[in-house]
Image (cartoon, rainbow, N blue to C red):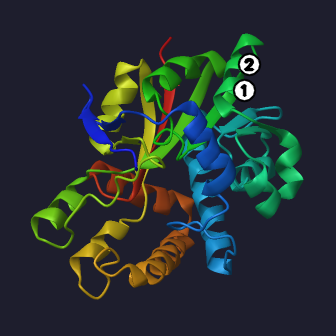
Amino acid sequence: MDRIYNLRTTEDGWKTVDPKPTAEELQDFYAQKYFQEEHGPYTAKPSADDLAHRDLQSRILLHAVEKARGAPAPGTTLLDIGCGEGFLLKAASEAGYAVRGFDFSDYAINAFNPDFAKFVTFGDAFASLDAAIEAREQVDVCVMEHVMEHVADPEELMTRLPGVLKPGGVVAISVPNDFNPVQAKAMAEGHIDKAFWVVPPEHLSYFNSGNLRAFFERKGFEILGAYGDFPIDWYLFHPGSNYIADRSRGKAAHLARMQLSLTLAQNGLDAYYDLLKAFHGVGVGRSNTIIARHRG
């Protein structure tokens, strides 16, 4: 019998599943299943658009970090927790960072960026984080792209993160933009009939632009920058592009999202970043990224 999950709303307004999967269940899911199967935008056989879009996502994150703390000087260190396929490690290395990564499995990085596997510690990523903190191995920039929605205890993770940062160091954290105004309107208008983004055990917590900022601030972080990404949920409002009403439209919607994002970025990262900041400001975009410094 499948586990039944309920949603609990936290004091900041974000939602989390209850009960949580066990540590053993999560480890098995990510080691044996997650990157070996195609799901959502993830594909084991990326097209040229996929690769260009992943590179753009990495470059805009590094651009946002640079806007917050300045360009990397020689020796500036960047840790990517949950580095996955290694696209950010590659882009950050090319931008001048000394890179390091933690991940549960070597499957994805060996498939996409095997040259960067030597910079990654494999195994329980949060045990690796604890070991780094214990050894006082601090970094200038700590990145978590689409990790926090997967972890069993985001509160504890945010409490631990300052321990891996050098004085003045920053975090860059991306999460899906869930229970956002566009999704609520799509539900109210009958374009969707359920909260399709609620997908445990893959995602265990659900944030949006408002409650994510509140969470960061309550945990003692000063927000230095924030941006969204392409609002693919807009496609739900037209029957010809509603990828939830007709799942066969999903790949075409993802392709259109990538091609439009790449086109919007053609006038430079500064202009594109301004657009993404505006998406975050009005609460749209399929994900949110926060750049922040701990006040302690």
Front-most of 139 and 146? 146
Q: Residue at x 41, y 65 (%)?
A: 230
Q: Does 166 appear above or below 96?
A: above
Measuring from the top left, give residue 67's x and y in whole percent.
55, 42
Q: Does 211 appear above or below 48?
A: above
Is residue 186 visible in this depiction of the protein?
yes
User: What amino acid is at disc 2?
Assistant: Ala
**Badges 1 and 2: C-beta atoms under 8 Å apart?**
yes
Mark 2 — residue? 131
Task: Characterize the local packing of mark 2: few (<14), some (14-19) or many (20 or more) Cα atoms within 10 angstroms.
Answer: few
Measuring from the top left, give residue 129's x and y in whole percent.
68, 25
Left or right side of 240 for 154: right
Front-most of 92 and 148? 148
User: What amino acid is at disc 1?
Assistant: Ser
Q: Which element type, helix, strand or loop, lies under badge 2?
A: helix
Front-most of 270 and 44? 44
Considering every residue shown, the one lying at the far bottom of the view is 240
Q: Disc 1 and disc 2: Cα gap in Å?
A: 5 Å
Task: Characterize the local packing of mark 1: few (<14), some (14-19) or many (20 or more) Cα atoms within 10 angstroms.
Answer: some
Is residue 166 visible in this depiction of the protein?
no
Q: Quadrant of residue 46?
A: bottom right
Q: Quadrant of residue 50?
A: bottom right
Q: Which element type, helix, strand or loop, lies under badge 1?
A: helix
Mark 1 — residue? 128
Q: Does 190 appear above or below 203?
A: below
Measuring from the top left, give residue 45's x and y in whole percent.
69, 75
Front-most of 214 and 135? 135
Q: Residue at x 78, y 39 (%)?
A: 99
Q: Residue at x 47, y 36 (%)?
A: 21
